[in-house]
Amino acid sequence: MTQIAEIAQKMTRASKKFFYDPSTKLDWPEHLDASEWTMSPELVSLYGTELWASMSEAEQKKLSFYETGGFFSLVLNGERPLLEGMSHRLYTLEKDLEVTEYMHHFLDEENKHMMMFSTYCRKYLGKIYPEKKIPVARPMAKGEDDIAFFTKVLVVEELSDYYNVFMSDDDRLAKICRDLNRAHHVDEARHIHFGREYLKGLWERHASGWTQAEIDSFRGWLVDYINASWRDFLNPSVYRDAGIKDAYAAREMAIHSAVSREHRNRASVRFLKNLVACEILPKVPELQ
Ligand SMILES: [Fe+2]
Ligand SMILES: [Fe+2]
């Protein structure tokens, strides 16, 4: 049995053991509002800036409330194309039956995550924030489409996992927020373990046949994609809902804020180091 098949088998066992019904998994309070912290203040995108310091605690909590909705919408919107791309690759790209069996659990769990995130947004915000990313078609080397797909999966999973882990045990937060973050992390820990190994295998299989120019082009795209993904955390619609007057100026300020940039680099370092270990990136890049 190959190494990836062994990992898949182990992950399948765990997924079966922890199988759950998303409609009964969490205790949803009837009402939740901005009187409680719903996101750890340190993770709120304007934390540490002058604007944040100028806000009252009630205003900060209000921003945390809408950022939570923005964050859950962002993960949900990242998981939607993931389901599509993963189903498309079942039994076509991937023919190993141990691996495809785990991919079915992966799909099942992502669908459950989307159900839980959308329940949160529907009950407490009454909406899902729309996705802003515009896919750009570009010429690709052989196998690059699959590598880019599994890389995008890891970007959404690894970045959101940093937030999930941070908030799982934060006693300042409303219980439903801790519970939802923890529930997501438990499944994602398996997805990330599998996804890293799977991506590594794809990279080894295909990139060895690429020219240096093709490798450089992929690496350039990847760093741009990670930077663009971080931009999605700075959402003017969220700022507007939280009562910030000039939402676009707040976004621009956060993009260039040293505190905010440090946060993005710190939250990405585990993921980036892993990409370097797999030789997908030559060194840990400085994110913008
Ligand atoms: Fe997920
Ligand atoms: Fe996942």
Image: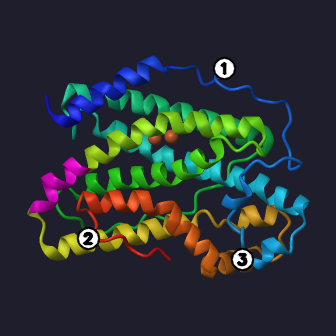
88 in the magenta segment: no
207 in the magenta segment: yes
For the N terminus, the image quarter is: top left
Residue mark closest to the camera, 1 vs 2: 2
* Residue 248: numbered disc: 3
Q: CA distance from mark 1 to mark 3?
A: 39 Å
Residue drawn at the location 42% of the way across and 57% of the way down: 270
Q: Main secondary structure of the magenta part?
A: helix
Choose between 52 and 71: the one closer to the eye: 52
Q: Which comes sooner in the sequence, label 1 or label 3?
A: 1
Do tag 2 and tag 3 residues touch (Cβ < 8 Å)? no
> Whole-percent x and y of residue 251?
68, 74
Tell me the quarter of the picture where residue 247 sits: bottom right
Q: Which residue is mark 1?
A: 24
Which portion, as a residue range, is magenta?
200-208
Q: Which residue is mark 2?
A: 282
Ligand 2 closer than 8 Å to label 2 CB: no
Judge the density around disc 3: few (<14), some (14-19), many (≥20) Cα neighbours within 10 Å.
some
- List the single residue furthest toward the left: 209
- Amino acid carrying label 2: it is Pro
> Whole-percent x and y of residue 21?
58, 20
Q: CA distance from mark 1 to mark 2?
A: 45 Å
Q: Which comes sooner in the sequence, label 1 or label 2?
A: 1
Q: Relative to 18, say whether 243 is above or below.
A: below
Would residue 101 be seen by someone viewing this image from the given angle? no
232 with respect to 175 (left or right) = left
Would residue 127 be seen by someone viewing this image from the given angle? yes
Tell me the quarter of the picture where residue 261 sits: bottom right
